[in-house]
Amino acid sequence: MQGIEAHAGIGQMDNSDVYQGLAVEQESAVRVLYFARLKEALGRDAERLALPPGVDTVAALHAHLQARGGAWASELAPGKPVRVAVNQSMATGETRIRAGDEIAFFPPVTGG
């Protein structure tokens, strides 16, 4: 009797297949950091995010995150003050992002 493994190559996968999948995901991933009220409202301080096709600017990432809805939509809503840094340099909506970048979202801060 043949088992399921004999059909369609099932059971033929080894760890290298898993690692290849992880490598592809990490190759297209960015690290996103959230500070202050964003960290509190979104319930996280960081995440690794695979960049979807077409998300290659700060503005596109902002819109992608806002589309999650709920707290994401309200905290990242137009007119809500949020600053962004890419690789620890202040960024604008037009700033290009790519795999491996660190993107930080934070509210404006005043000091004295």
Image (cartoon, rainbow, N blue to C red):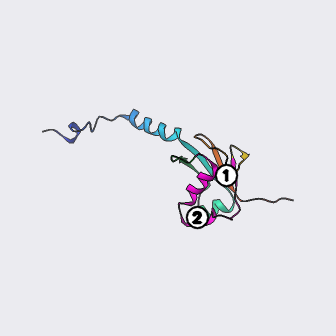
Residue 107 point in image, percent of width and height: 71, 59
Total residue callouts = 2
- To which quarter of the image does residue 75 belong? bottom right
Residue 54 position within the rendered picture, expressed as x and y whole percent measured from the top left:
54, 47
Q: Residue furthest left?
A: 1
The answer to if 107 sits in the magenta stretch is no
Q: Is residue 111 above or below residue 18?
A: below
Q: Foreground residue, 7 or 1?
A: 7
Crowd around label 2: few <14 · some 14–19 · many ≥20 (10 Å): some
Mark 2 highlights which residue?
73
Question: Residue 62: x and y, percent?
Answer: 61, 55
Res 36 → quadrant = bottom right
Magenta region, residue range: 56-85
Measure the alpha-carbon separation of dots 1 and 2: 17 Å
Dot placed on the residue nearer the N-terminal end, 1 or 2? 2
**Secondary element at image label 2:** helix
Which quarter of the rendered picture does the N terminus lie within? top left
The amino acid at mark 2 is Ala
Label 1 vs label 2, nearer the camera = 1
Quadrant placement of the C terminus: bottom right
Q: Which residue is mark 1?
A: 93
Question: In what element is the residue under mark 1?
Answer: loop
Q: Is residue 100 above or below residue 81?
A: above
What residue is rendered at 71% in x and 45% in y?
88
